[in-house]
Amino acid sequence: MTAPLLYVCVRPQRDAAVAEWASFRDGLGVGDDDLVHHDLVREPLPDDIERFAAVVVGGSPFNVTDNEKTDGQRRLERDLERLAATAIEGRTAALFTCFGIGVVTRLLGGVVTLQHPEGTGPADIVLTDAGRDDELFGILSPRFEALTAHKEGTDSVPPGATLLAQNDACPVQAYRAGRGLWATQFHPEPTTDAFVARMRVYRDAGYFDADAFDEVSAHVRTASIEQPTRLLRSFAARAVAA
């Protein structure tokens, strides 16, 4: 790889952030030095984004729909919007996940809502016709499992974006916008063990019944997440080829 990839962290919890970086590293199939870690919670977005081969944006306990936001969260959202605009224009390639899809949806003039919450665990994801033809998603099975745990979702595909994947719980699971931006509602990076470890960090955050941790964890471990990993490998391969 001639230039490194960039992982943009939007998790305040450092242990969860480091573990997520490792999950992306393994999912992308790159080495430690090939995935630079940038903590957007504590540091503004670098001005030299275009020096990276591509960018992946991790998840967060933040929500676009939060009624009260700190100045730091608002700055973080503005930085993500700036990154998204850069990718939409084709000046870099970016994969936004989880909280990030909400930021991009709002930027594009779409609606982020609390009407489509998702349970914690495996979800069935279905590709659209456009998804089956997409350069990244087209290598995936038309129907596959991925891990979710979200309080908000995108109500409908935002203006200017192309819907790539959906399911009954959340009508927008993935889309593409512009020349170089992809966004997923689901988490493409964690193994089931990594997801259970993340659940421990957010056990009392309202994503699931804390008293049912063992039951929910057992359900998570039944997931087959080979297809989301293939998506990350496809993204990394595109970055190398660009």
Image (cartoon, rainbow, N blue to C red):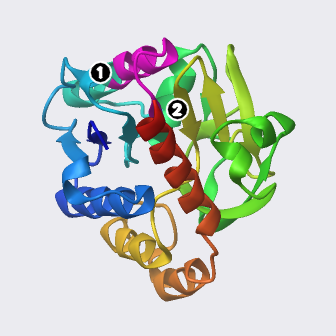
Q: Which contiguous range is marked in magenta?
A: 80-95
Residue 143 horizontal side relative to residue 28, left or right:
right
Q: Amino acid at mark 1?
A: Glu
Considering the numbered disc 2 on the image, is that residue within a helix, a strand or a loop? helix
* Residue receiving disc 1: 50
Seen from the viewer's position, the closer of residues 218 and 2 is: 2
* Residue receiving disc 2: 102
Residue 170 horizontal side relative to residue 181, left or right:
right
Q: Is residue 165 magenta?
A: no
The image shows a total of numbered marks equal to: 2
Seen from the viewer's position, the closer of residues 178 and 78 is: 178
Residue 187 percent coordinates (x, y): 52, 55
Point out the residue furthest to the right here: 129
Q: Residue placed at 34% from the left, 57% from the top?
A: 30
Question: The N terminus lies in which quarter of the figure?
Answer: top left
Q: Quadrant of residue 147?
A: bottom right
Q: Residue placed at 52% from the left, 55% from the top?
A: 188
Q: Is residue 156 visible in the rendered structure shown here?
A: no
